[in-house]
Image: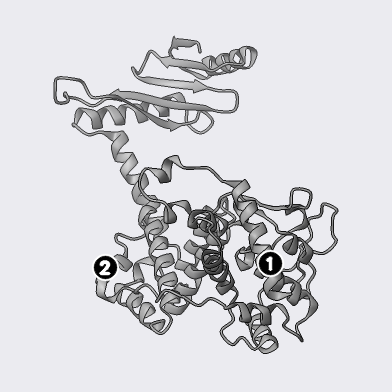
Amino acid sequence: MPTISCRIDRPSIDKATKEQRAKGERVTLSDTACSGLKLVINSQSASWVYAYRKRGYLDGGRRHPQRTMKLGDPATMTPAEARLAAEQIKAQVRAGEDPAMIERRERADRQAAEARRLTCGQWADRYEQSLSSQQTKHVRDEVRNVRLALNEMGVSNLFPEEITSKLVRLLVELHAERPATSRHRYGALSRFLDHLLDEEAIDLNPAQQISKKRRPKPPTSRVTHFSISQLRRLWHADGLKPEYQRYLRFMITTPLRAMEAAELRWDQVHSDEAELRLMAADTKNAEYFVMPLSGLAKAQLGGQTAESLSKVFQLTRVEDGEMSSWSHFAKAVRKASGVESFALHHLRRTFSTLMAEHTDVPEGIIDGLLNHKQSATRGGVIRHYQLAKQLDKRRVTMAAWGELLEGWVQ
């Protein structure tokens, strides 16, 4: 990177530009008429810069670090104008100021002012974009709960600084009869407000100003699971649409989450190895997961063998559309089976409970097949050092579950 000392003028700039194009590397002109002033010429741009040191010394007798300020470009600023701008900076330095820090603060103030001119709805759009690289169900639910919270508080078209702790408290009270919903709304909103805090759109997070006694409490743990007779009635539920019944039976045989199974594609089914392979983006905990399949589970998948991006279960009228009629599905199953307490998530608890009661399979293997986050099921040092997937043991476990089901439902 050659540096040429000269009195910078138009001819010297043109000459240096030609030299840069010929050599293909940066050329720097150092002005002899104004110490510290330079013109840096790159292949795509050129900039006037001025370097200086603040007067005085730091603790320990060291001098202040050198700072560099960009003044402009030669297309809009002549050498004389650049020298004038440099002299103005010199005057500030002689007065004991630090022009670069002043400029930095002014830029930060402008960015903060711009941030405060965006509405909550506009910030929600930006928040969604910032999370767009993580296309997981958790992220989609997070954004959805943020938007619902803003709408329920009536602040989508207001500025973030207009969100008060009282509005957040009223949001929590709005869902007092649904503690799980209340916690989802509050948690997503609080994380969104933390994002606004980082972006300097607000000075504090109003969700954190609520007293602990007014924050949403954890919902009562669900303990519902099905008996063997209830499983049999669910398996033989008459009157269900064939695709609903096939999906229900698959959920009985395989403890996936409802959406993981509903979004299952044929290219995720590996029949030869008798397993499903879910990418990180397909699971709730954003981790790659392999689910072994029993013979009974494979039978519910049908005869599709060619690799395809289409879904295994067509639960909607729109081909490959996303399943959204979960309430309708649950009501149809309750009516057809007579199991009034039916909910899809109870099938996962049923698998865990009946396997523990009727086999000697360790709880860790069973929990691993539920694909819970390791941090929630393992503590201490083992959480960081025990990373084995125990796939062979999981295969044996799923085969045992299939044999149990065959005896119970058939």
Q: Residue at x 56, y 28 (%)?
A: 45
Q: Is residue 334 left or right of residue 244?
A: left
Q: Residues within 10 Å of mark 1 (few under 14, many from 20)?
A: many
Q: Which residue is mark 2?
A: 209
Front-lying residue, 132 or 101 = 132
Residue hosting label 1: 262
- Where residue 356 is drawn, which disc sits there? none
The alpha-carbon separation of the residues under discs 2 and 1 comes to 40 Å
**Nearer to us in this view, 155 or 13:** 155
Q: Secondary structure at mark 2?
A: helix
The structure residue drawn at horizontal position 62% and vertical position 68%, both measured from the top left corner, is: 258
Residue 224, given in percent of the width and then of the height, sits at 50, 77
- Crowding at dot 2, Cα within 10 Å, few <14 / some 14-19 / many 20+, comes out as few
Name the quadrant containing residue 79. Answer: top left
Q: Quadrant of residue 309?
A: bottom right
Above or below, 208 against 288 in this view is below
- Counting residues from the start of the chain, the first of labels 2 and 1 encountered is 2
